[in-house]
Image (cartoon, rainbow, N blue to C red):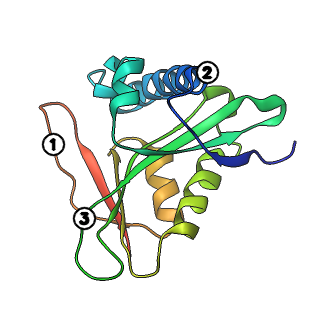
Amino acid sequence: MPSPRIRPLDLTDDDALAAVHRIGRAAYAVEAGLIGFDGIPALRESPADLRARPLRWLGAVAGGGALAGFLAWQEEPGAGPAGGAVSVDRLCVAPEHFRRGVASLLLRHLLSDVPRGRPVTVTTGAANTPAVALYERLGFTRGPDFSPVPGLRMASFRRD
C-alpha cells in the first residue's frame, strides 16, 4: 500500500471539514479509552468550532482520496528571525489507519518545514502510550506532566 500524500487542508471546504470532524471524534474517543478520561474537549467540538480555530491544517490522503489523518498547528509569536514556537494543537489518525505510519508521516512533514532553531511543542495524555512513543521516537524531549483538570494527566514535549 503506497504512503498517503500530504497536503494542506482547507476547512472552508465542507467535505474536508466533515472528514476532519469525523476522524477527530473517532481518534479522540480511542485516546479517551487509553487515558481513562472522556472529558477531552475535542470530543465536544462542532464542525463550526473546528472551522473557527486559528490553526493551519495538513492532511494525509490515502489511496482513493480518503483522508487518513490530519495535523493542526499554530505559530506562536516570538522575537528574532526564527519566530516563536510551533505548537501542535492536534494530530489525529482515523482508527482504520492506525499503525500504518500516518502520524509519523504528518509530523515529519511539519518538522521538515519548521525553520531551524524554532521549537516545536505538543501535549498528549500522559497515558497515551502510542503518542508518547511517537514523540520520543521523533526526537521530542518530554517536559513536565501537568493536570489541567482533575483526573487528567497530560505530558508535554518539545523539540528544538
First reached walking from the N terminus: tag 3 or tag 2 = 2
Q: Residues within 10 Å of mark 1 (few under 14, many from 20)?
A: few
Q: Residue furthest front?
A: 12
Q: Which residue is mark 2?
A: 15
Q: Left of 36 or right of it: where is 25?
A: right
- In which quadrant of the rendered image does the C terminus lie? bottom left
Image position of 122 with respect to 143: above or below: above
Q: Which residue is mark 3?
A: 77
**Image coords of residue 45 (percent x, y):** 34, 21
Q: Rounded to the nearest whole Å, what is the CA distance between mark 1 and mark 2?
A: 35 Å
Eye-nearest disc, 1 or 2? 2
Secondary structure under the numbered disc 1 in the rendered image: loop
Name which residue type carries label 3.
Answer: Pro
Q: Tell me, yes or no, if residue 136 can be seen here.
A: yes
Q: Which residue is mark 1?
A: 147
The residue drawn where x is 61% and y is 29% is: 94
The residue drawn where x is 71% and y is 43% is: 100
**Image coords of residue 153 (percent x, y):** 23, 41
Name which residue type carries label 2.
Answer: Asp
- In which quadrant of the rendered image does the N terminus lie? top right
The residue drawn where x is 55% and y is 36% is: 10
Q: Tell me, yes or no, if residue 101 can be seen here.
A: no
**Image coords of residue 21 (percent x, y):** 49, 22
Secondary structure under the numbered disc 2 in the rendered image: helix
Q: Residues within 10 Å of mark 2 (few under 14, many from 20)?
A: few
